[in-house]
Image: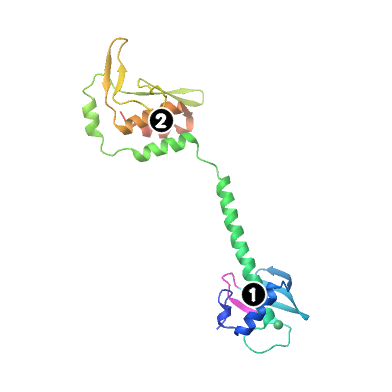
């Protein structure tokens, strides 16, 4: 059986494994090079011994050679020392990949605030809202959101106002029909949230238009 880098200890004599690991820990593996699965290293063990190996990407040891006189067993201590070196290099490489991934993720363009806000609202849009719409229509006035193109932005305004803290739309909402006449419009929590969010955003870039339309179709 051809051992692989993760399990070679199972096929190599225990004493050889120990001695090889000790050489690796004492940093006797030098001139290590690795290219396309071809590994070369010189192990200092009294004399310098040259080890060469061939590894598949998944870690199967395809071939291994050492110029020392030891010719018993599966491998010599120098080859084992180099295997420990390869294992450590691979661990390090895997860690590096993870770090690269994290950095790439951090560098990825963040979604714009408006996009995040609109997506969140759309995800919460209730499906069966017809019943509510019918009930509200008995009122003479309706809550509305006015969307206007101003330059390269869509600007929101509404007959519904944010509360004093400019945080949310109060419900039921008082809507002025005239300076002396008011109507109360009960808004669902979702509608309140939509109006509040859009009013707080104030305006969004033109590219948000289809999302805004989609969103407004979910409320009155
Ligand atoms: Zn050897």
Q: Which quadrant contains ligand 1? A: bottom right
Which corner quadrant holds the C terminus? top left
The magenta-colored residue range is 56-63
- SS at mark 2? helix
Instruction: Indicate yes or no: mark 2 CB to ligand 1 under 8 Å.
Output: no
The mark nearer the N terminus, 1 or 2, is 1
Residue 8 lies in what quarter of the image?
bottom right
Say which residue label 1 marks. 83
- SS at mark 1? helix
Q: Position of residue 132 (x, y in %)?
A: 24, 31
Question: Magenta stretch containing residue 163, yes or no?
Answer: no
**Crowding near the residue tagged with mark 2, few <14, some 14–19, many ≥20 C-alpha atoms within 10 Å:** some
Q: Position of residue 105 (x, y in %)?
A: 55, 49
Q: Is residue 181 left or right of residue 43?
A: left
Q: Position of residue 190 (x, y in %)?
A: 32, 34
Which corner quadrant holds the N terminus? bottom right
Compare residues 200 and 148 and report the one nearer the observer. 200
Residue 170 lies in what quarter of the image?
top left
Compare residues 80 and 203 and report the one nearer the observer. 80
Task: Return the mark for residue 16.
Answer: none
Q: In this rendering, is residue 94 above or below 29? A: above
Res. 52 visible in picture: yes
Residue at image point 45% right, 33% down: 208
Asked if marks 1 and 2 touch (Cβ < 8 Å), the reply is no
Q: Is residue 215 left or right of residue 201?
A: left
Q: Is residue 210 left or right of residue 104?
A: left
Residue at image point 43% right, 35% down: 117
User: How far is the residue under mark 1 from the one under mark 2?
Assistant: 59 Å
Say which residue label 2 marks. 197
Residue at image point 60% right, 65% down: 91
Q: In this rendering, is residue 214 above or below 15? A: above
């Amino acid at each position: 059986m051809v051992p692989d880098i993760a399990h070679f200890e199972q096929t190599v004599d225990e004493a050889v494994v120990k001695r090889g690991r000790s050489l690796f820990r004492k940093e006797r593996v030098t001139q290590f090079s690795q290219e396309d699965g071809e590994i070369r290293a010189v192990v200092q063990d009294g004399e310098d011994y040259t080890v060469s190996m061939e590894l598949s990407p998944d870690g199967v040891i395809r071939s291994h050679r050492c110029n020392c006189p030891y010719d018993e067993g599966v491998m010599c201590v120098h080859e084992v020392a180099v295997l420990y070196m390869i294992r450590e290099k691979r661990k390090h490489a895997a860690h590096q990949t993870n770090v690269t991934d994290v950095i790439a993720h951090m560098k990825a363009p963040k979604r714009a605030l408006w996009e995040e806000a609109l997506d969140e609202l759309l995800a919460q849009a209730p499906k069966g809202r017809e019943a509510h719409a019918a009930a509200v229509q008995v009122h003479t006035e309706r809550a509305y959101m006015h969307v206007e193109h101003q330059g390269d932005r869509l600007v929101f305004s509404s007959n519904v106002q944010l509360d004093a803290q400019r945080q949310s739309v109060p419900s039921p909402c008082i809507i002025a029909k005239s300076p002396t006449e008011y109507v109360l419009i009960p808004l669902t929590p979702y509608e309140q949230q939509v109006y509040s969010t859009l009013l707080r955003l104030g305006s969004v870039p033109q590219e948000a238009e289809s999302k805004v339309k989609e969103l407004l179709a979910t409320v009155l």
